[in-house]
């Protein structure tokens, strides 16, 4: 559902994202990384503004997204230090590991039955000392909701379970912000963790 819906709204989404801002939490995440650090951007969308911001910090960005039209737009920006490819997160098999993984507004689109599988996969792809920054729903839930005229699927597991999964997979919780508000945006949960 989400892949088809994002493909349908790709141009509208691109216009919206071109005018949007980079969260202070992403700015802080970038400051933890050294130049030439490798970052995986999960659900990178059009590559703007987030991947472009990271790339401008001399961070090497790999962006993945299941929606082909989003990747077409991302590639059209020709962002230095960034590569983009069509891939589902669970199908993605990188040839390298990463110093950071960013999943800004993407994990909550994954099937609920797959939510617990995120963390071992992330741990496998992260270098020791690497950071994981992601947004998530703040309640145990599964639902659909319209956005830009199309229907999208969302799911979440309890935040207490996220803490357990992080710990079980060698990821140390740095913060977990509930109802994070910034400018005109509101996210149920934002989490930063670091691989031991």
Image (cartoon, rainbow, N blue to C red):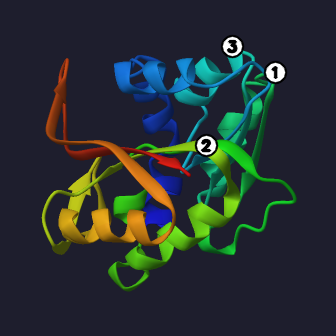
Q: CA distance from mark 2 to mark 1?
A: 22 Å
Query: Which residue corresponds to mark 1?
Result: 80
Whole-percent x, y for residue 5 in the image: 43, 60
Q: Position of residue 67 (x, y in %)?
A: 59, 57
Residue visible at 55% across and 24% down in the picture: 32
The secondary element bearing badge 2 is classed as strand
Percent position of residue 117, x then y: 49, 78
Q: Secondary structure at mark 3?
A: helix
Left or right for 70, reference 36: left
Which is more N-terminal, label 2 or label 3? 3
Mark nearer the viewer, 3 or 2:
2
Question: How many labels, in total?
Answer: 3
Q: Considering depth in this image, is 133 or 181 the residue closer to the camera?
A: 133
Disc 1 crowd rating (10 Å Cα; few below 14, some 14-19, many 20+) is few
Residue reaching furthest to the front:
196
How far apart marks 3 and 1 lie (CA) works out to 8 Å
Q: Earlier in the sequence, mark 2 or mark 1?
A: 1
Residue at horizontal 55 percent and vertical 72 percent from the top: 120
Q: Which residue is mark 2?
A: 130
Going by the image, does 46 lie left or right of 134?
A: right
Residue at 25% across / 72% down in the picture?
161
The part of the image, by quadrant, that contains residue 2 is bottom left
Give me the disc on residue 52. none
**Foreground residue, 96 or 93?**
96
Give residue 20's quadrant in the image.
top left
For the residues labelled 3 and 2, the Cα–Cα distance comes to 20 Å
């Amino acid at each position: 559902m989400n892949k088809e819906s994002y493909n349908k709204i790709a141009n509208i989404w691109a216009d919206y994202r071109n005018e949007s801002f980079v969260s202070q939490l992403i700015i802080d995440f970038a400051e933890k990384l050294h130049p030439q650090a490798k970052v995986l951007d999960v659900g990178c969308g059009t590559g703007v503004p987030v991947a472009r911001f990271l790339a401008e910090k001399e961070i090497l960005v790999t962006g993945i997204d299941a929606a082909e039209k989003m990747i077409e737009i991302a590639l059209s920006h020709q962002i230095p230090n960034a590569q983009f490819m069509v891939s589902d997160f669970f199908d993605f098999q990188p040839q390298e590991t990463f110093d950071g993984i960013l999943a800004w507004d993407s994990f909550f689109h994954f099937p609920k039955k797959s939510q617990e599988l995120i963390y071992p996969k992330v741990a496998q792809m992260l270098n020791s000392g690497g950071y994981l920054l992601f947004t998530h729903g703040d309640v145990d839930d599964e639902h659909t909701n319209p956005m830009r005229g199309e229907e999208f699927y969302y799911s979440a597991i309890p935040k207490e379970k996220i803490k357990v999964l992080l710990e079980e997979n060698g990821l140390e919780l740095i913060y977990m912000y509930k109802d994070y508000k910034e400018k005109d945006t509101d996210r149920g949960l934002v989490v930063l963790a670091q691989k031991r």
